[in-house]
Structures are given as C-alpha cells and as structure tokens.
Image (cartoon, rainbow, N blue to C red):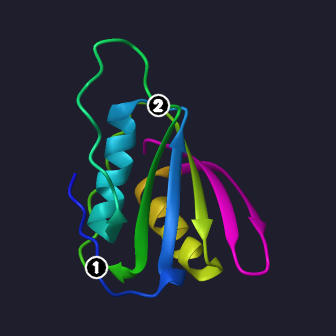
C-alpha cells in the first residue's frame, strides 16, 4: 500500500479508520479500497508477515475525505466481517461512511456525535 497523502488539506477532512476483529488480509483489502476512493494521508504499509500467529488487534489509517477520486472501485472481497471505527469531523466521517456503504455490506452501524467530532462504528461484510 502506498500513501497518496497530500501536503496541504484541511485537517477537518481527515478521518481515522480503525479496523478490528480481522486479520492482515482483510485489513489490507479495506485500506487499499479506501485508498482508491480517498487519498490516504497516513497509511503505513503492513510489516512483513509474522512467523507466528500474533497479529495486531487494531489496524489504523487516516484518509483525507476531501480528496475523493472520481473512479469508484469494484466491491472488494472480504474473507470475514470487519469492525470499522471512523473518527473525525461530522461531514468527513459521513463521506467515508457513505463510501464504505457503497463498497461493503454494512450489517450494523452506530454513531456518537460530539460538538466537533463524530465517531461511527460499522460492521463490514462481503457483498
């Protein structure tokens, strides 16, 4: 995965995406798909495969919701359900949530809104 970060964009367009309850392959599928929709601001490439079964419990990347690309990717294939936690400005989170809803089956969605930030939790499944 490569970062397509921009050097100058409003910080309120950044959405942090945290993935859990999934392995490296499904996390990579979700992040690469989001990177095709939005510019990845901070998307470190996953390290080499581990020799043991220990995987991180949370995968994290940040995307610039204002840098939406014109081409929509085809719906990707997930191996299992993935829990996604989106955090950022109300409008920015709504943009990323809408994109995920168009690419994956969203089996459940909850959100908590604060004065300046919104948090949305989605359960993503393959279509």
Q: Do the residues labelled 2 and 1 touch (CB within 8 Å)?
A: no
In the image as oriented, which residue stretches furthest toward the top? 52
Q: List x then y, in percent, for residue 83.
A: 57, 42
State the residue in front, 75 or 48.
Answer: 48
Residue 76 appears left or right of 54:
left
For residue 71, above or below residue 110? below
Q: Which quadrant would the C terminus be assigned to in this image?
A: top left
For residue 97, above or below residue 65? above
**Local crowd at mark 2 within 10 Å, few (<14), some, or many (≥20)?**
few
Q: From mark 2 to mark 1, how far is it between C-alphas?
A: 27 Å
- Let me know if residue 75 appears in the view: no
Which image quadrant is residue 99 in?
A: bottom left
The span picked out in magenta is 106-127
Q: List x then y, in percent, for residue 57.
A: 53, 32
For residue 1, above or below residue 118? above
- Let me know if residue 86 appears in the view: yes
Could you tell me which secondary element the residue under label 2 belongs to? loop
Q: List x then y, in percent, for residue 11.
A: 49, 82
State the residue in front, 83 or 104.
Answer: 83
Could you tell me which secondary element the residue under label 1 belongs to? loop
Q: Mark 2 points at which residue?
A: 56
Q: Does the magenta stretch include residue 5?
A: no
The secondary structure that most of the magenta stretch takes on is strand
Q: Mark 1 points at which residue?
A: 6
């Amino acid at each position: 995965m490569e970062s397509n970060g921009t050097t100058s964009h409003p910080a309120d367009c950044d959405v942090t995406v945290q993935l859990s309850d999934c392995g490296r392959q499904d996390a990579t599928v979700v992040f690469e798909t989001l990177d095709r929709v939005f510019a990845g601001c901070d998307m470190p490439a996953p390290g080499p495969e581990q020799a043991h079964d220990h995987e991180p419990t949370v995968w994290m990347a940040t995307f610039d919701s204002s840098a939406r690309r014109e081409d929509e990717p085809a719906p990707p294939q997930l191996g299992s359900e993935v829990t996604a936690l989106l955090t950022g400005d109300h409008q920015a989170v709504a943009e990323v949530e809408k994109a995920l809803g168009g690419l994956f089956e969203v089996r459940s969605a909850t959100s908590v809104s604060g004065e300046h930030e919104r948090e949305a939790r989605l359960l993503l499944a393959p279509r």
